[in-house]
Image (cartoon, rainbow, N blue to C red):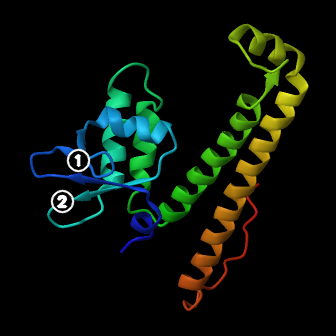
Amino acid sequence: MSSAKKNADRLIKKYPNRRLYDTQTSSYITLTDVKQLVLDNEEFTVVDAKTNEDLTRSILLQIILEEEASGVPMFSSAVLAQIIRYYGHAMQGMMGSYLEKNIQAFTDIQRKFTGSTFEGKPFSPEMWTQFMNVQGPMMQGMMNNYIDQSKSLFVQMQEQMQNQSKTIFGAFPFVPTPPTDKK
């Protein structure tokens, strides 16, 4: 049993007819309902009703695909192509970790701002504009912190790759070539 199943409060079963059944509410739900569970920070697991195979990632990817196909997409074609290029690449695992940590850092910054209130009221768009105009230096500092974290993660990723390369190729007797002067 996976850790996702152990931690999930809600079990959703996917049947061969492609319908999703929420065992907590004893009703069929749609992808839109699953998206709402995500937005509400509800823990859930989607499993195949026949095999009990965990399908959570597949359902989440379906939701992303629908979101990308309608409205304003979050990812450009170039970004999607770059992500695809990392599949099967030696740095695939590190890239996933890098993206996850960067999204978490971005979420932390967003949470600091969305939790803000003024005189007990949540910020309106006009208040956000005023706030951002006044808080430019603070925002710049937070973004610099985000960039520094991102840079640090990338440097760690490079170091891990270098260490892996040394481990893999360390057994081969390479003869260093002296630098040549080109004048």
- In the rendered image, residue 96, in percent from the top left (x then y), is placed at 51, 57
C-alpha separation, residue under disc 1 versus residue under disc 2? 9 Å
Q: Quadrant of the image for the N terminus?
A: bottom left
Count the labels in the image.
2
At horizontal 47% and vertical 67% (from top left) the residue drawn is 90
Image-based side of 25 in relation to 20, left or right: right
Which residue is outermost to the left? 17
Image-quadrant location for residue 98: bottom right
- In the rendered image, residue 41, in percent from the top left (x then y), is placed at 52, 44
Question: Is residue 93 positioned above or below 119 on the image?
Answer: below
Neighbours of disc 2 within 10 Å: few (<14), some (14-19), many (20+): some
Neighbours of disc 1 within 10 Å: few (<14), some (14-19), many (20+): many
Q: Amino acid at mark 1?
A: Tyr
At horizontal 45% and vertical 44% (from top left) the residue drawn is 82
Image-based side of 118 in relation to 16, left or right: right
Q: Are marks 1 and 2 in contact (CB under 8 Å)?
A: yes
Image-quadrant location for residue 68: top left
The disc at residue 49 is 2
- In the rendered image, residue 142, in percent from the top left (x then y), is placed at 82, 37
Which element is circle 1 on? strand
At horizontal 15% and vertical 52% (from top left) the residue drawn is 15
At horizontal 44% and vertical 55% (from top left) the residue drawn is 86
The mark nearer the N terminus, 1 or 2, is 1
- In the rendered image, residue 49, in percent from the top left (x then y), is placed at 18, 59
Question: Is residue 108 positioned above or below 97 on the image?
Answer: above
Image-based side of 63 in relation to 109, left or right: left
The disc at residue 83 is none
Q: Label 1: which residue?
A: 21
Which residue is outermost to the top? 126
Q: Give 166 or 116, whichever is nearer the viewer.
A: 116
